[in-house]
Image: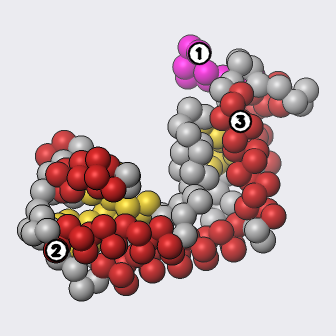
Amino acid sequence: MTECNADVMITGSQKVLACPPGISMIVLSPRGIKRVENSKPKTMYFDIRDALKNQERGQTPFTPAVGILLQINKRLKEIERMGGADVEIARVEAQASDFREKIKDMSFELVSESPANGVTSVRPKNANAYDIFLILKDEYDIWICTNGGKMKNEVFRVGHIGALTHDDNTTLVNAFKDLQRRGIL
């Protein structure tokens, strides 16, 4: 936060940590805390001052999703055990690069010219993206992320965060190659 000169950072349990959704986390700098303490809430139900007050006694103002908190705790300890955030960021970047390198000569195009390392959005050139998702799920027991709305049939996403390895990339790419041999892709 210091590097970014940020007073508030907000994330969700499903973002970056690869835990189930259900917990939002807010981190405040000392300056951010002072600002919160000196302002009145503009909402009826959410007053971050209650959270700060409860934090002093090691509690939350309301009953949280305890199972998800335990998973977040375990994931943070795992990241620390593996060498810290910088090591995890580098691992995810390597995972993303490995996947993109393995599909570069296939009938896909990347949606973004400068994709983030957490996920790769892929547009099949000759196939329906949602059909690929269904075939991978039903026939190969591989799950990729579907897109919604107007792009449901055009784009799918492959995640690179969490307990994934280059071998997982190879398994997925081998399934893509099989779909090519079958004339599906």
> What whole-number distance in Å separates the C-alpha atoms at marks 2 and 1?
57 Å
Residue at 32% across, 49% down: 137
Looking at the rendered image, the quarter that the N terminus falls into is: bottom right
Task: Give x and y (percent) for residue 116.
Answer: 43, 68
Which numbered marker is on residue 45?
1
Query: Residue 34 or 129: which is nearer the viewer?
Result: 129
Residue at 20% across, 67% down: 179
What residue occupies the far right of the structure in this picture?
57
- Segment tinted magenta in the rendering: 41-50
Mark earlier in primary sequence (3, 2): 3
In the rendered structure, are the residues bearing label 3 and label 2 in contact, judged by CB atoms less than 8 Å apart? no
**Up-down: is 17 above or below 54?**
below
Q: Local crowd at mark 3 within 10 Å, few (<14), some, or many (≥20)?
A: some
Task: Give x and y (percent) for residue 96.
Answer: 46, 73
Task: Give x and y (percent) for residue 153.
Answer: 14, 51
Query: Residue 176 or 96: which is nearer the viewer?
Result: 176
The amino acid marked with disc number 3 is Leu
Residue at which label 2 appears:
181
Viewer-nearest of discs 2 and 1: 2
Residue at which label 3 appears:
69
